[in-house]
Amino acid sequence: MKHVEVIKKKCCGKIIAACIYPLCKEDDDWLLQKRIYLKKGHVAITLNHGEDWKLEKCNCTEKTKKGKSKMQRGKVEKAERLAFNNFDKWNEVSGVVEEGSGYYYEILDVISDSVHIGIQMALYGKVNYGEEGEVLKE
């Protein structure tokens, strides 16, 4: 009987990749991808060829150890820095706000909130606010 090696997501158990024996023991691309999946904590299992299964897209929002979505990790800080740099360039030319003043830091806070609003809308379709109306920066 033929077997199929599949990769199941650790978060939801959906099958996201599959390879038929014996090809999965010989195919370098499969072996590389399998190693990557296993390093991420996903599970490789063997199924009988006739078993009922299908490839599915995972719609989970996995969390890293720090509690941030993998889509955000490392990118939030970069997005904020790019936005701050853009403001600094404009402010150097216009001279509207004195760098280091209270207004300057208030504007940076507004920019940071705006970045987080954009990220949350893109990822979740909604913005999370705290009890006092502040944008949560999870």
Image (tube, rainbow, N blue to C red):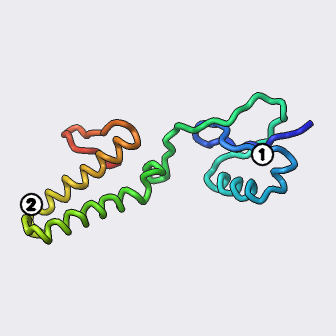
Q: Residue at x 25, y 40 (%)?
A: 130
Taking depth in this image into account, of 90 and 35 the one nearest to the observer is 90
Q: Residue at x 84, y 50 (%)?
A: 23
Left or right: where 138 falls relative to 31: left
Taking depth in this image into account, of 101 and 88 the one nearest to the observer is 88
Q: Residue at x 39, y 38 (%)?
A: 124
Query: Which callout, 2 or 1, points at the residue further toward the start of the chain?
Result: 1
Q: Residues within 10 Å of mark 2 (few under 14, many from 20)?
A: few
Single out the residue that lies furthest toward the front. 93
Left or right: where 32 falls relative to 86: right
Single out the residue that lies furthest toward the top. 52
Q: Quadrant of residue 78?
A: bottom left
Q: Residue at x 36, y 56 (%)?
A: 76
At numbered mark 2, what does the secondary structure look like: helix, strand or loop? helix
Q: Amino acid at mark 1?
A: Cys
Which one is in front in this view, the residue at disc 2 or the one at disc 1?
A: 1
Please count the marks in the image: 2
Q: Residues within 10 Å of mark 1 (few under 14, many from 20)?
A: some
Left or right: where 127 falls relative to 64: left
Which numbered marker is on residue 103? 2
Expressed as whole percent of the image width and height from the top left, the position of residue 64 reads 49, 51
Expressed as whole percent of the image width and height from the top left, the position of residue 138 reads 35, 48
Taking depth in this image into account, of 72 and 89 the one nearest to the observer is 89
Which numbered marker is on residue 19? 1
Relative to 126, does residue 74 appear above or below in the rendering? Answer: below
Relative to 29, does residue 4 appear above or below in the rendering? Answer: above
Looking at the rendering, in which quadrant would you find the N terminus?
top right
Which numbered marker is on residue 75? none
At numbered mark 1, what does the secondary structure look like: helix, strand or loop? strand
Relative to 102, does residue 127 appear above or below in the rendering? Answer: above
Q: CA distance from mark 2 to mark 1?
A: 59 Å
